């Protein structure tokens, strides 16, 4: 039997209802804040990700699903959404009338990481981006949205961590200080940190390898090196969050994996997931639009890990699982033919009806209706046909009533609607 690919998964009925509910809540929230959905391709030219995410990152170095198409052009399954959204924003000149745009994407991303609990090779993200707004309030809005969404999904045990990575004015000074600090400790750092130290020493700050963590304990803090503008920007983010009543932790080691961030970065961490503790992350990337060939337009955004959110959401899937409103237990070909007409008529009127098409015994049909959690069962066999009625049974109260055949659809509709309204 052919099994699915390692690190990939199916989201089956029973679980998918929870995903749909999370998606519905997230969409409503984002649209209430003025974000518009954009659908972008699953594949892009490899160059787009290599240039934007950065050649020295884990994603580009080791994790992308890259392959030549039939003409030999290198294409990649998107490992994240921001690069594609920026490409689309530039390609369609979305900035022309007004650069300020809020966009969101919900969909699968692909990274060839080592599969483990909470880490998949195809995973899903909810991604939101704000273009054309340099103000710190845009960053505060994104962090606020993450906390509101967590709350609405019943996710507890989350904390927003925030940091500033400075800008091209102040980061070189910090990089130099950090490199000076790392030079004496280079031998204790992992191979990745050692190799990247020349071009991107910041990565060593949030390396998860124990020896790197130990070596970097007393590393200088970026927050001591911010220029007045970056300081002011970061203070405004914090002030706005405090006024919104959002709890946050300032974490000067939060540098995030991607190269394109500047100024504000943030992550939402949870204690409920073990080692894979980040549910969402994001930050400001003021240089990226220009770097990818557009005008100089600031931007900021976040990505939420949908899979992880589904794991820790406090919602109960059984509350959204759709069960049949009515199960039609019809016996014999004539009754089945009639039942089929009723079930279709109910379906198009928004009443979920299910029926047995294999002509099983009444006993096994009743069992099936019970297993499926139907609210009502309509019993329709030879005797009922003779009497010109069908019997509608309320599975909860066990009350039964006979319905004339020409009123079946209407009566079921009324019964179901009255059950739903109480
Ligand atoms: P990143 O784009 O790496 O900042 O990821 C943003 C969020 O996506 C993370 O906080 C995770 O919740 C989620 N995520 C990233 N990689 C994976 C993965 N391989 N499997 C599941 N979720 C992931």
Image: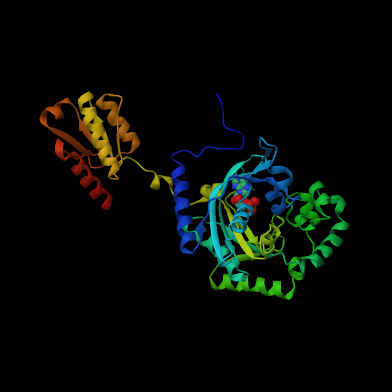
Report if residue 266 is visible in the image. no
Label count reads 0
Image quarter where the N terminus lies is top right
Q: Mark yes or no: residue 326 visible.
A: yes
* Residue at the farthest left position: 387
Residue 27, percent from left and from top: 47, 56
Residue at the image position 56 percent from the left and 68 percent from the top = 98
Q: Position of residue 151 (x, y in %)?
A: 49, 59
**Which percent across, then down, holds residue 383?**
14, 26
Above or below, 91 relative to 124: below
Protein image colouring: rainbow
Across and down, in percent, residue 102 comes to 54, 62
Does 269 sit above or below residue 226? above
Vertical comparison of 359 with 159: above or below: above
- Residue at point 60% right, 65% down? 248
Q: Quadrant of residue 378?
A: top left
Q: Is residue 417 left or right of residue 101?
A: left
Query: Which residue of the protein is positioned furthest toward the right in this rendering?
Result: 184
Viewer-side residue, 25 vs 349: 349
**Which residue is at 82% across, 46% downward?**
191
* Side of 119 relative to 355 (left or right): right
């Amino acid at each position: 039997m052919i099994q699915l690919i390692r690190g990939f998964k199916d989201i089956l009925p029973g679980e998918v209802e929870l995903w749909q509910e999370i998606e519905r809540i997230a969409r409503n929230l984002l649209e209430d804040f003025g974000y518009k959905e954009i659908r972008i391709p699953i594949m892009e030219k490899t160059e787009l990700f290599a240039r934007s995410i950065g050649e020295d990152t884990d994603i580009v170095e080791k994790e992308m699903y890259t392959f030549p198409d039939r003409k030999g052009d290198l294409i990649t399954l998107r490992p994240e959404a921001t690069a594609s959204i920026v490409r689309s924003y530039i390609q369609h000149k979305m900035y022309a009338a007004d650069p300020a745009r809020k966009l969101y994407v919900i969909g699968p991303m692909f990274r060839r990481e080592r599969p483990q609990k909470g880490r998949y090779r195809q995973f899903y993200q909810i991604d939101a981006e704000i273009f054309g707004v340099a103000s710190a309030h845009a960053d505060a809005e994104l962090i606020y949205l993450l906390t509101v969404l967590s709350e609405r999904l019943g996710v507890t045990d989350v904390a927003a961590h925030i940091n500033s990575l400075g800008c091209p004015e102040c980061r070189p000074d910090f990089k130099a200080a950090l490199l000076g600090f790392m030079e004496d400790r280079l031998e204790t750092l992992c191979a990745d940190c050692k190799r990247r130290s020349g071009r991107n020493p910041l990565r060593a700050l949030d390396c998860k390898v124990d020896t790197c963590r130990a070596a970097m304990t007393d590393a200088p803090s970026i927050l001591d090196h911010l220029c007045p503008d970056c300081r002011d920007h970061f203070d405004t983010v914090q002030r706005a969050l405090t006024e919104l009543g959002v709890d946050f932790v300032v974490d000067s080691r939060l540098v995030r994996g991607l190269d394109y961030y500047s100024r504000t970065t943030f992550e939402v961490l949870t204690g409920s997931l073990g080692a894979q503790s980040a549910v969402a992350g994001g930050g400001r990337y003021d240089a990226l639009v220009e770097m990818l060939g557009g005008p100089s337009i600031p931007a900021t955004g976040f990505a939420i890990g949908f899979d992880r959110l589904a794991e820790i959401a406090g919602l109960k899937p059984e509350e959204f699982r759709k069960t049949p409103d009515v199960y039609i237990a019809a016996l014999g070909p004539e009754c089945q033919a009639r039942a089929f007409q009723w079930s279709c008529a109910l379906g198009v009127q928004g009443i979920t009806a299910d029926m047995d098409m294999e002509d099983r015994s009444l006993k096994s049909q009743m069992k099936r209706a019970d297993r499926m959690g139907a609210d009502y069962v309509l019993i329709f066999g030879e005797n009922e046909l003779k009497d010109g009625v069908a019997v509608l049974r309320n599975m909860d109260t066990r009350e039964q009533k006979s319905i004339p055949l020409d009123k079946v659809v209407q009566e079921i509709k009324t019964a179901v609607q009255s059950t739903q309204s109480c």
